[in-house]
Image (cartoon, rainbow, N blue to C red):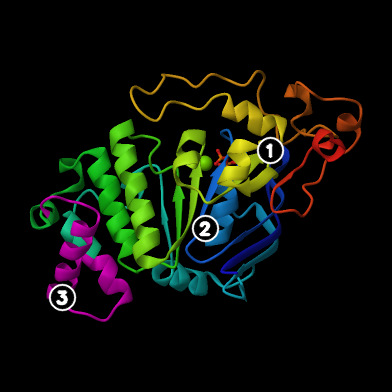
């Protein structure tokens, strides 16, 4: 297994108390596989993957559990080692491409810099490589794009440039955190194509974070549904969409936005809101919003179990 995460826990000390952001998350990722991580805002998608990337810098954070990448334990690895891994093997792209781009340099120059930071090659060779990469992410005129500044590109173009930058290190693992959320549907479809192409040409493994079940259904091989810092259901894409088990997954599926045409301004909401991570209910965290809750749900937290398709729900266990 390329990536094995076991019982990951991340908590933050705050003035209001301890925030248990990630409460025992486990998952595996194989080479060339696309894992969709889905859940409402605040469910712990970003924090769990930032932990994998070694990018949680908050001094009040505590990270426990095990994150093994190609057999090597990452929890507790010195920052310098993690940085080397991020530049060479693991790349991350975010919702806002400007977090990775510098406004004052041209696209070509900054991607070339990134390449030179990790490979011992001259500027001319690096710039040649940038042109190839921009062609690979479907810039119609890569040479011209290289001379542009980020603000001279559209949001979709900027995100493509960031993907080109991420590809420059030929990553074995790409973590994409809602990279299409700010883009319109057509541009989003292009980015999803790109991720699929990346998997087929580079055999990269991809973790794709989204709150959008529609995106998951387009892209993921396997899916992990998160709620209040835990995994509530996991399975293959087919299992999850043909036989959703957890009431939360079912609720999310009731709110799939259309993949074509106009995006609705707001998703049809699941009644209620996620619990405060400072005061989680004793039993199932989804219980207060769950249409099928019954007594056992208030006493204990349901566990996920070990199957490839599994749901953390007493109703499911009973069925
Ligand atoms: N540095 C921090 N200090 C305190 N709480 C945090 C910190 N970072 C994240 N959190 C909390 O962790 C929870 C999970 O956040 P996040 O992973 O960003 O959710 P998602 O990506 O699913 O929207 C949220 O409740 C968030 O407020
Ligand atoms: Mg997030």
Badge 1 crowding class, 10 Å Cα cut-off, few under 14, some 14 to 19, many 20 or more, is many
Q: Secondary structure at mark 3?
A: helix
Determine whether, in the image, residue 3 is placed left or right of residue 277: left
The foreground one among 125 and 54 is 125
- Ligand 1 contact, mark 2 (Cβ < 8 Å): no
What is the magenta range?
112-141
Is the residue 256 above or below the residue 98 in the image? above
Identify the residue position indicated by label 3 in the image. Answer: 125
- Residue at far left of view: 144
- Ligand 2 contact, mark 3 (Cβ < 8 Å): no
Badge 3 crowding class, 10 Å Cα cut-off, few under 14, some 14 to 19, many 20 or more, is few
Q: Residue at x 34, y 38 (%)?
A: 188
Q: Residue at x 65, y 29 (%)?
A: 250
Determine which of the numbered discs, if any, sits on residue 55 in the image.
2
x and y, in percent, of residue 295 in the image: 91, 26
Q: CA distance from mark 2 to mark 3?
A: 30 Å
In the rendered image, residue 134 lying in the magenta stretch gets the answer: yes
Determine whether, in the image, residue 184 is placed left or right of residue 9: left
In the rendered image, residue 194 lying in the magenta stretch gets the answer: no
Is the residue 130 above or below the residue 213 in the image? below
Q: CA distance from mark 3 to mark 1?
A: 47 Å
The foreground one among 291 and 148 is 291
Q: Earlier in the sequence, mark 1 or mark 2?
A: 2
Asked if residue 212 shows in the view, the reply is: no
Q: Main secondary structure of the magenta part?
A: helix
x and y, in percent, of residue 45 in the image: 57, 45
Determine whether, in the image, residue 209 is placed left or right of residue 227: left
Q: Determine whether label 3 and label 1 are within 8 Å by CB.
A: no
x and y, in percent, of residue 173 in the image: 46, 63
The foreground one among 55 and 245 is 245
């Amino acid at each position: 297994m390329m990536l094995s995460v076991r019982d990951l826990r991340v908590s933050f000390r705050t003035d209001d108390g301890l925030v248990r952001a990630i409460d025992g998350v486990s998952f595996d990722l194989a080479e060339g596989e696309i894992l969709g991580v889905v859940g409402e805002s605040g469910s712990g998608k970003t924090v769990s993957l930032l932990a994998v990337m070694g990018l949680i810098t908050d001094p009040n954070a505590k990270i426990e559990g095990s994150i093994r990448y190609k057999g090597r334990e990452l929890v507790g690895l010195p920052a310098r080692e993690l940085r080397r891994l991020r530049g060479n093997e693991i790349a991350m792209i975010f919702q806002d491409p400007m977090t990775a781009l510098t406004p004052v340099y041209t696209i070509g120059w900054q991607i070339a810099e990134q390449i030179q930071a990790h490979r011992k090659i001259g500027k001319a060779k690096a710039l040649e490589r940038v042109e190839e990469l921009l062609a690979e992410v479907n810039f119609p005129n890569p040479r011209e794009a290289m001379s542009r500044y980020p603000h001279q590109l559209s949001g979709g173009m900027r995100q493509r440039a960031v993907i080109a930058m991420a590809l420059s290190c030929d990553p074995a693992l790409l973590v994409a955190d809602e990279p299409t959320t700010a883009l319109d549907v057509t541009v989003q479809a292009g980015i999803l194509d790109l991720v699929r192409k990346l998997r087929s040409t580079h055999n990269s493994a991809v973790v794709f974070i989204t709150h959008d079940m529609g995106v998951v259904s387009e892209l993921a091989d396997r899916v992990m549904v998160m709620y209040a810092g835990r995994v509530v259901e996991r399975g293959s894409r087919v299992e999850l969409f043909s036989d959703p088990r957890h009431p939360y997954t079912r609720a999310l599926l009731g709110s799939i936005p259309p993949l074509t045409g106009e995006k609705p301004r707001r998703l049809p909401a699941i009644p209620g809101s996620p619990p405060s991570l400072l005061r989680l209910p004793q039993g199932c965290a989804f219980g207060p919003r769950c249409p099928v809750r019954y007594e056992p749900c208030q006493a204990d937290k349901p566990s996920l179990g070990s199957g490839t398709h599994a749901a953390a729900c007493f109703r499911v266990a009973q069925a």
